[in-house]
Amino acid sequence: MKNKLVFVTQNKNKVIDAQKMLKNYEIEHIEFDVPEIQSLNIEEIASFKVKYAYEQTKTPCFVWDVGLFLECLNDFPGPLVKWYFTKTVGPEKTCKIANLFSQHTCRWTTVLAYYDGEQTHFVEETVFGTVPTEPRGENGYDWDVIFIPDGEKRTFAEMTYEEKAEFAVTKKLLSKFEDLLNNLDKK
């Protein structure tokens, strides 16, 4: 019988990733709107979200939050990427901004927070890359069309799920999370 993990998110893509990569666990997906505080610190946002989720579910759970840091904008939008990307600037303008400044370096950081009712535990993973001159690709989601991981010429959106998993933070992040859970179980 698999151990159960409660994952609170409205992002079905994150749930699919967790289910594929945390094979030793049964992922129970609970979906509701979790308020997101305004902060440029991803860990602070994730901590608030997981404690709020725990208050609602009354069970240990995890959340994760992401940030896209663009060198050409002094690391903006960071954790404000969802608002930046989907509500205001978007992929085409992001590429134009990087082109304007001739600064295409960026990084994608994800922080996973797990709250057991007493303590918040964090795992973090970062992948470095560049912004292409224009959005490319059809696969993936969100800003995959504007992220080329270091060592590649294709955006995440031009890769298959399996190819992206070799570069993206999710596989490493969830592996670290599984290690954390195993260490917690030994205590």
Image (cartoon, rainbow, N blue to C red):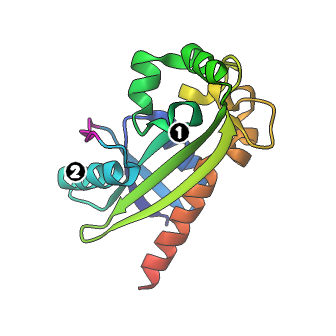
> Which residue is drawn at the image coordinates 26% and 51% (left, top)?
48
Q: Dot 2: what SS?
A: helix
CA distance separating discs 1 and 2: 26 Å
Q: Nearer the viewer, mark 1 or mark 2?
A: 1
Where 18 sits versus 187, above or below? above
Q: Nearer the viewer, residue 108 or 55?
A: 108
The C terminus lies in which quarter of the figure?
Answer: bottom left
Residue 152 image position (x, y, % from top left):
80, 38
> Which residue is drawn at the image coordinates 30% and 67% (left, top)?
116
Residue 131 image position (x, y, % from top left):
66, 29
**Residue 70 visible somewhere in the drawing:** yes
Residue 95, picture quadrant: top right
Asked if marks 1 and 2 touch (Cβ < 8 Å), the reply is no
Where does label 1 land, which residue? Answer: 69
Where does label 2 land, which residue? Answer: 52
Count of all numbered marks drawn on residues in the image: 2
Under mark 1, the amino acid is Phe
Q: Nearer the viewer, residue 173 or 28?
A: 173
Residue 104, picture quadrant: top right
**Start and end of the magenta stretch?**
32-38
Residue furthest to the bottom:
187
